[in-house]
Amino acid sequence: MRKTGTTLLLFIILATVALAQGPHRFQPGFNLFSKQQDVQLGQEAAAQVRKQMTVIHDPVLTNYVNQVGKRLASAPEARQSGFPFTFEVVADPSINAFALPGGPMFINTGLLKAVDSEAQLAGVMGHEMSHVILRHGTNQATKAKMIELPAVLAGQVAGGSMMGKLAQAGIGLGANSVLLKFSRSAESQADLTGSHIMAESGYNPMEMARFFEKLSAQGGGRTIQFMSDHPNPGNRERAIEQEAASLPHRNYGFQTGEFPRMKQAVAGIHEPPPRKAQQ
């Protein structure tokens, strides 16, 4: 009983502080890439991903992630970004998902197997979508290659492969690419913006916090990749809870109704062993 009272008191304190501060709003940082170049880069990189990973064409899984994804993409932050979001499932046991500049998103079967609810999946997808909206990948590439990029991007206007020209500047699509490895500040922004997208889509943003808390407690090999790609900015769960409390009251509980079918379908997928990470 005392524990319940303490938890309730903590939530009230967090809600009071959050309401006083209001929701956080972020804008994309300095970027030498145009939004059109983000889209071209993402499309070229997505074509590489499809060659390197096994895309799952199961209609139940494909339709499901697209239902959830399109629901999230209709939220104001996503819609106003103008990016053409796409959603695909790949056979990989790691609990992970990633989004490329301009909108292509890939969701691992390992993530679909790990989530306990549709809202938890929406939390991860909203987080990834926020990286695209805030243009974190090309912002980090800009900061990492400030000297080389102007000439590379100027040459790209004449046509040709964006990925090919970026490779000349040392920017690739490997596991340690600046396009996919984000700072703790970027992770924090994606957490909070993702919570807004969830709420606006009818999903309880507290489920994002619960899923991250579950991964932190679970540990183990399958979650190492997620935590490596998405470093904890510090007090992640509490920050999301506080942000959720600052948002306007909404009726959460939206569901596609297809979550049980998705879980049944993904349970039958046997993933290949994880591939050796590229640099």
Image (cartoon, rainbow, N blue to C red):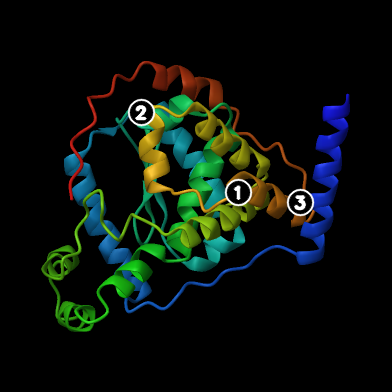
Estimate the spatial distance between the alpha carbons at disc 2 and disc 1, rounded to whole Å: 22 Å
Image marks 2 and 1: residues in contact by CB distance under 8 Å: no
Q: Earlier in the sequence, mark 2 or mark 1?
A: 2
Other residues around mark 2 within 10 Å, as few (<14) / some (14–19) / many (≥20): few
Position in image of residue 191 (x %, y %): 56, 52
On the question of residue 211 being in view, the answer is yes
Which amino acid, mark 3?
Ala
Question: Residues at badges 3 and 2 in contact (C-beta under 8 Å)?
Answer: no
Element carrying mark 1: loop
Residue at mark 3 to residue at mark 2: CA–CA distance: 33 Å
Res. 235 mark:
1
Numbered badge on residue 121: none
Q: Amino acid at mark 1?
A: Asn
Of badges 3 and 1, nearer the viewer stands: 1
Along the viewing direction, whichever of 9 and 109 lies nearer the viewer: 9
Mark 2 falls on what kind of element? helix
Left or right relative to 234: residue 20: right
Q: Which residue is mark 3?
A: 245
Q: Is the residue 151 above or below the residue 91 in the image? A: below
Quarter of the rendering containing residue 92: top left
Kindly identify the residue that appears in the image at 88 percent across and 24 percent down.
1
Q: Is residue 204 above or below residue 222?
A: below
Amino acid on which the number 2 mark rests in the picture: Gly
Which numbered disc flags the more N-terminal residue, 3 or 2?
2
Give the Cα distance between marks 3 and 1. 16 Å
Q: On the image, numbered disc 2 is attached to which residue?
A: 221
Q: Position of residue 90 (x, y in %)?
A: 31, 35
